[in-house]
Image: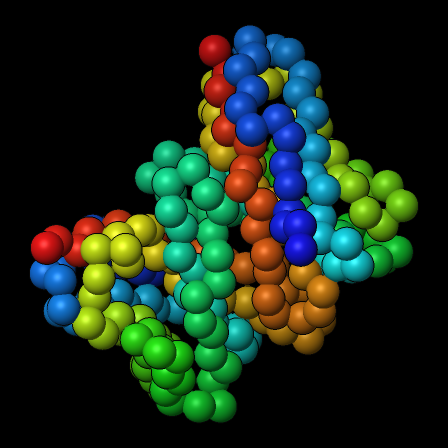
């Protein structure tokens, strides 16, 4: 079946611009996660959605970052007033239950 | 504060050899320890995972060894193949109530040479 999809695959933007990154989870998966992978670093947790519960935003690095999940499916990660340090690969994962997370291919964000 | 420390950063192994990657964690509340494999341009894929109620788990050529008292776990790849060349990440999470958000190590780039 279809896996987690993310769009765009690559995004180049100028410092100060806003960007939106999209994630389409696997159908039926109730949990959705966003992670950030910076060059040479491991993955860093950003935010977690589980069903209709309030999201866990504990990993968001600043108030410039926000995310929403509409209808319990598609999620959008928004970064306002982008900075060069925001350049990274943004990965989305979904999960049908506890433990196993299935990752999408990521969106590579470059802030010039 | 890095809660999961991974070593080595890179590893070169001959075909047919054993690849060993080590991780150490600090948070004793972690109760789920997966390993992910990532190829260039792809998202990480779950390889194998273990819970602390067992000391070892084997799936094919991949084995996790877990030492709860030392707060360490390792991945062993037996009979390493060129197709195993990838970046490997260890991770840890708190299951129930923790949302299973993963804390990752910094990754190990494995190269298997012919």
Quadrant for residue B56, please give it.
bottom left
Q: Residue furthest front?
A: A1
Q: Is residue B65 visible?
A: yes
Is B70 or A35 nearer to us in this picture? A35
- Give whichever of B98, A26 is nearer the camera: A26
Visible in this render: residue A77?
Answer: no
Q: Position of residue A1 (x, y in %)?
A: 67, 55
Q: Residue at the spot x=54%, y=59% of the render? A: B102
Which residue occupies the foreground of this view, A20 or A8?
Answer: A8
Q: In the image, what residue occupies the spot 47% across and 84% down?
A: B52
Judge from the rendering whether residue A90 lies leftward or rightward of residue B67; answer left or right. Answer: right
Against B67, residue A7 (above or below) is above
Where B7 falls versus A86 (above or below)? below
Name the side, left or right, on which B112 lies relative to A110: left
What residue appears at the point 38 percent right and 47 percent down from the top-left corner? B39
Query: Residue placed at 21% from the left, 55% from the top?
Result: B82
Where residue B69 sits: x, y (%)? 36, 86
What colouring style does the render use? rainbow
Spot occupied by residue B91 in the image (x, y as percentages of width and height): 45, 63
Count of marks, rendered view? 0
Q: Position of residue A101 (x, y in %)?
A: 60, 60
């Amino acid at each position: 079946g279809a896996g987690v999809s993310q769009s765009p695959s690559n995004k180049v933007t100028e410092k100060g611009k806003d960007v939106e990154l999209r994630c389409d989870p696997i159908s039926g998966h109730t949990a959705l996660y966003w992670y950030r992978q910076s060059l040479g670093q491991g993955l860093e947790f950003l935010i977690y959605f589980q069903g209709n519960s309030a999201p866990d935003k504990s990993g968001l690095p600043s108030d410039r970052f926000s995310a929403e999940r509409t209808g319990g499916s598609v999620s959008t990660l928004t970064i306002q007033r982008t900075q060069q340090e925001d350049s990274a690969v943004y990965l989305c994962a979904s999960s049908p239950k506890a433990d196993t997370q299935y990752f999408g291919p990521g969106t590579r964000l470059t802030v010039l | 504060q890095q809660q999961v420390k991974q070593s080595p950063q890179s590893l070169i192994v001959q075909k047919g050899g054993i690849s060993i990657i080590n991780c150490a964690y600090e948070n004793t509340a972690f109760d789920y320890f997966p390993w992910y494999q990532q190829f260039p341009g792809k998202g990480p894929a779950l390889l194998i995972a273990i819970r602390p109620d067992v000391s070892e788990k084997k799936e094919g050529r991949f084995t996790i060894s877990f030492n709860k008292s030392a707060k360490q776990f390792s991945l062993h790849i037996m009979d390493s193949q060129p197709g195993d060349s990838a970046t490997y990440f260890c991770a840890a999470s708190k299951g129930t109530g923790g949302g299973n958000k993963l804390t990752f190590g910094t990754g190990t780039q494995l190269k298997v040479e012919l």
